[in-house]
Image (cartoon, grey):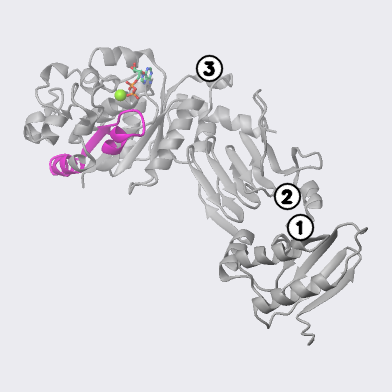
């Protein structure tokens, strides 16, 4: 039998890494993977092994990915933890860029108006009572935040909301929300809302939040999040 | 060039009709040719405030539907050389008026008049759309109450989508003692939120109500606070820079002092 070596298995402390060749056809890959994984006799006593799949420069459609997962899952004791590829589609790249982009909007967001963007929002202007701003990333308001701000609205709890003057009706981060007190109160200047360890939205001074969210610095945050 | 100005607010009962009547009166007193248009179909009352109710034969819907000529529906106010009213219909359906019809009427009126002042109904639906359709400028009226300011903000947002000059603000029914006690929003607070130019402020004054009930807008009277306020607004519309009246200033000073002493912090 000719050993093609389309599949290289590496054992690590955390489980197995499958390096899959990216020049052969997908079918060849499946065939060899099927054989290779069947050959290996696996100790029945052993607990579940997590598998990381590395595709190199190969792009898999979601149904191909599913095929691959099913094949590996059928083998005893193997669970796919992660499938990693060096390549993404243009579409994904665009979306990724959008999600990591900062959109600058100059406007007063008035009562009844909603601004909804993908990525971070830098609003130069006020959010008035009854107005809403939403972003999948962070929200920075250079102005008075008197309405509703919803950061990380697709589920990112690490997102923060910053405002020059913070006097919101509500702050929302991911699925959490906090509201202004029922009694009359004044706002605060240069503060920032974030989710603390206990899963509550806290408002604190900018300096404090900057320490808690070091990833706010620089572009790397988007690479990390991607 | 003639100008069409719509008076709007979102919320009802804040003083759109009163402002329309008094602004029209003040502009006519300054020898301008003025036509008032009531677009509050079904709830007309500009004619009552102007004391012209008994002269109505045709109305704006009759004109829109082609039942009469525009000139036939115009009511002349005999107290002036050149003040006319195009009344709203009391019984018709709002949908009988359309933005297109408004634009057509206004462009015809512009040949004849210097200022066309349009009284807008409350709300943000068809009636509002009709009223702003042919306007070049908008004046937003609010009172120093949160709900009224909220609705004004909503309207300003909608007006920004129209091809109008930036809207200007009139704050109506100001009560000095309530502002002083912090029981009402101050002028500064309102302007800070709405962030548009202030055209004028009008005190809350029983005389305004009395005058309206007599079919004689307060602006006729030479010396009440409110009439001076309305006349000043008219002069500012004509481009004069008229400082706030002393009682208005008093208000302005108060709010500035408050800020100076850092009551916010
Ligand atoms: N500055 C004022 N002082 C006292 N009463 C006022 C003043 N402005 C308006 N009003 C009264 O408030 C009521 C509502 O005013 P109106 O002009 O009819 O409001 P709208 O047209 O916006 O519904 C009327 O009874 C009017 O006389
Ligand atoms: Mg009215």
Where residue B235 sits in the image (x, y, percent)?
A: 31, 36
Where residue B141 sits in the image (x, y, percent)?
A: 39, 30
Give the residue at x 58% y 18%: B181
Task: Tell me the quadrant of the picture where the C terminus of chain A can be found.
Answer: bottom right
Name the one closer to the observer, A46 or B25. Answer: A46
Give the residue at x 92% y 59%: A46
Quadrant of ligand 1: it is top left
Magenta span covers which residues? B103-131
- What is the chain identity of the residue bearing mark 1? A
Q: Which residue is mark 1?
A: A215
- What is the chain identity of the residue bearing mark 3? B
Estimate the spatial distance between the alpha carbons at disc 1 and disc 2, rounded to whole Å.
9 Å
Element under label 1? Answer: helix
Residue at the limit of the structure toward the front, as seen here: A1
- Is the same chain shared between marks 2 and 3? no
**Residue B98 is covered by the magenta coloring:** no
Q: Which residue is mark 2?
A: A158
- What is the chain identity of the residue bearing mark 2? A
Where residue A14 sits in the image (x, y, percent)?
A: 88, 63
Is A37 on the left or on the right of A177, as rendered?
right
Task: Tell me the quadrant of the picture where the N terminus of chain A can be found.
Answer: bottom right
Q: Judge depth for marks 2 and 3 and give the one in front.
A: 2
Q: Residues within 10 Å of mark 3 (few under 14, many from 20)?
A: few
Element under label 2? Answer: loop
**Residue B125 is covered by the magenta coloring:** yes
- Is the same chain shared between marks 1 and 2? yes
């Amino acid at each position: 039998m000719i050993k093609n070596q389309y599949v290289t298995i590496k054992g690590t402390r955390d489980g197995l890494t499958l390096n899959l060749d990216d020049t052969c056809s997908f079918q060849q890959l499946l065939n060899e993977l099927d054989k290779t994984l069947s050959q290996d006799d696996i100790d029945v006593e052993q607990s579940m092994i997590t598998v990381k799949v590395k595709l190199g420069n190969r792009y898999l459609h979601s149904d191909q990915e599913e095929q691959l997962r099913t094949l590996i899952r059928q083998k005893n004791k193997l669970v796919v933890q992660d499938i990693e590829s060096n390549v993404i589609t243009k579409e994904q790249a665009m979306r990724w860029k959008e999600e990591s982009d900062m959109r600058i909007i100059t406007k007063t967001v008035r009562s009844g108006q909603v601004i909804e963007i993908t990525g971070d929002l830098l609003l130069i202007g006020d959010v008035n009572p009854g107005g809403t701003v939403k972003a999948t990333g962070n929200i920075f308001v250079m102005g008075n935040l008197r309405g509703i701000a919803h950061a990380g609205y697709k589920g990112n709890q690490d997102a923060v909301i910053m405002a020059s003057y913070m006097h919101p009706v509500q702050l929302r981060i991911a699925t959490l929300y906090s509201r202004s007190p029922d009694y009359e109160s004044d706002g605060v200047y240069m503060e920032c809302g974030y989710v603390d360890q206990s899963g509550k939205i806290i408002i604190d001074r900018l300096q404090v939040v900057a320490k808690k969210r070091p990833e706010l610095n620089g572009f790397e945050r988007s690479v990390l999040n991607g | 060039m003639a100008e069409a100005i719509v008076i709007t607010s979102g919320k009802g009962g804040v003083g759109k009709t009163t402002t329309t009547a008094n602004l029209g009166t003040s502009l006519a007193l300054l020898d301008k040719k003025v036509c008032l248009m009531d677009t509050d179909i079904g709830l007309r009352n500009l004619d009552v405030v102007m004391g012209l109710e008994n002269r109505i034969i045709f109305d704006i819907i009759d004109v829109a539907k082609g039942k009469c000529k525009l000139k036939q529906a115009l009511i002349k106010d005999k107290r002036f050389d050149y003040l006319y009213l195009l009344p709203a219909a009391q019984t018709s359906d709002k949908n009988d008026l359309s933005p297109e019809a408004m634009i057509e009427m206004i462009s015809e009126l512009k040949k004849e008049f210097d200022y066309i002042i349009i009284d807008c109904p409350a709300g943000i639906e068809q009636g509002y759309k009709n009223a702003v359709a042919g306007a070049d400028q908008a004046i937003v009226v609010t009172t120093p109450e949160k709900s009224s300011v909220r609705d004004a903000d909503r309207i300003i947002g909608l007006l920004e989508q129209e091809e109008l000059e930036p809207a200007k603000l009139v704050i109506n029914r100001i009560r000095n003692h309530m502002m002083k006690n912090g029981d009402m929003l101050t002028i500064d607070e309102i302007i800070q939120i709405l962030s548009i130019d202030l055209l004028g402020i009008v005190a809350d004054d029983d005389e305004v109500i009395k005058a309206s009930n007599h079919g004689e807008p307060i602006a006729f009277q030479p010396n009440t606070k409110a009439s001076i306020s309305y006349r000043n607004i008219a002069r500012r519309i004509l481009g004069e820079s008229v400082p706030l009246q002393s009682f208005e200033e008093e208000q302005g000073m108060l709010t500035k002092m408050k800020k100076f002493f850092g009551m916010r912090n």
